[in-house]
Image: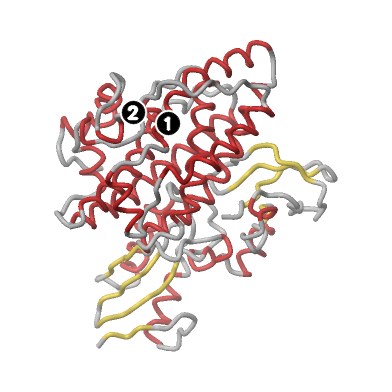
Amino acid sequence: MNSAHFSYVQRLGDNALILGQRLSAWCGHSPFLEEDIAMANTALDLIGRARMLYTHAAAIEGQGRDEDALAYGRDERQFGNFLICELPNGDFAFTLMRQYLIDEYHHQLFQVLCMSGDATLAAIAAKAVKETAYHVRRSGDWVVRLGDGTDESHRRCQCALDDLWAYTGEFFAGDAIDSAMAAQGIGVDPAELAPAWREAVAAQLKHATLVQPRDDWQADGGRAGLHTEHMGHLLAELQFLQRAYPGLKW
Amino acid sequence: MVVVNPPGDVSTPALQAVRAVLDAVCDPEIPILTIADLGVLRDVRMDGGRVTVVITPTYSGCPAMHAIDQDIRSTLAAAGYGDVAIETELAPAWSTDDLSAAAHVKLRSVGIAPPAHRTKDKRALLGRDVACPRCASQQTERISEFGSTACKALYRCRSCLEPFDYFKCL
């Protein structure tokens, strides 16, 4: 088994699952019906993506585990998602600003992964990149609508951006796993994605009349399994049923 | 002996029979479309008594896939095929270009605007120039990015004023 390959694919799945879990919590609580449907559908896309990535990771590992074992049978320290994915939803502005920053990243990332030497990963990316084009258009529209909206929506949107900015550095901080995968033509060195992301985000924030925060201290650790205090609570809810009744099926 | 049908070749009578049975399997969310219309059905193989059906997922999170899987099994079982295997194929990724010409006609007939062809065209991908399925007017506007299912957006015709679903390009 190529352990870097396994970890690389699994971590992509972790980002999708954890963000999908957070977004799902909006179901039934969004400000109006269409938005409720949009939020739940985006969550569905992410969880579906996690399923494909986990199934693929489990096949690479070859130890007989499956998507459920990876989603429900691992502890906090074994998850390698970005910290930004696990942060509590906050208000609507926080959720949509986070979504926009991540959607823009995924849009860049999956375009490159469409050319991965791993044919299955390339196929998953080919699907994800088109779905993400819809995600980023919606979240980007909301950033403009809220940022360039009322005083209150602008204030909330700017606060969300200020709080979230320190979590975006993790997108581009590669480690040994990324380097190995980039060298083998399977993955991408995340630092290469930074210029296009920064350019797109800067243009959108300007359009939204928001002030891009100064680059200052950046949080990290998520990809190495060092999470925020929120992650344990998230997993408790996500994994409860399989922890209480291992192997339970519908 | 393994009998494999190359794409587009359904000449083997036994395979033709299986495909005819599978024509009864429809998308649970857009029941006017069969899984063959949708392009979800990729291949059918027969090896002795075993039928292998190859399908591909549409949207990553499409909740219909599980139902389609079960419908294939129960439909084939009812037709006397007891030994059925279903394989999921990811590459090449499904696209709305895989919808058959018949699917486009069927969608329009139930008031759903079919996806524009050629998804590489950015304008089509993001749903500009969507014609009203009722009056064919190009004067339409998007109301919501997501409609009754993940694969559709909600539009409104500015000419006949009717709201309609648009099957998004993917």
**Crowd class of label 1 (few under 14; some 14 to 19; many from 20; radius 10 Å):** some
User: What label does residue A220 carry, if any?
Assistant: 2
Point out residue B85 in the picture as x, y percentages from the top left corner. 28, 68
Q: Is A68 in front, or is A210?
A: A210
Q: Is residue A44 left or right of residue A240?
A: right
Q: Name the residue at 40% across, 87% down.
A: B13
Q: Is A184 in front, or is A104?
A: A184
Q: Is residue B59 left or right of residue B77?
A: right
Is the residue under label 2 in contact with that under label 1 (CB below 8 Å)? Answer: yes
Query: At label 2, which amino acid type do we have?
Result: Asp
In the displayed structure, A91 sits above or below B58; it is above
Residue B19 appears in the figure: yes
In the displayed structure, B72 sits above or below B8; it is above
Point out residue B118 in the picture as x, y percentages from the top left corner. 64, 63
Q: Quadrant of residue A80?
A: top left
Q: Quadrant of residue A216?
A: top left
Which residue is disc 1 drawn over?
A169
**Crowd class of label 2 (few under 14; some 14 to 19; many from 20; radius 10 Å):** many
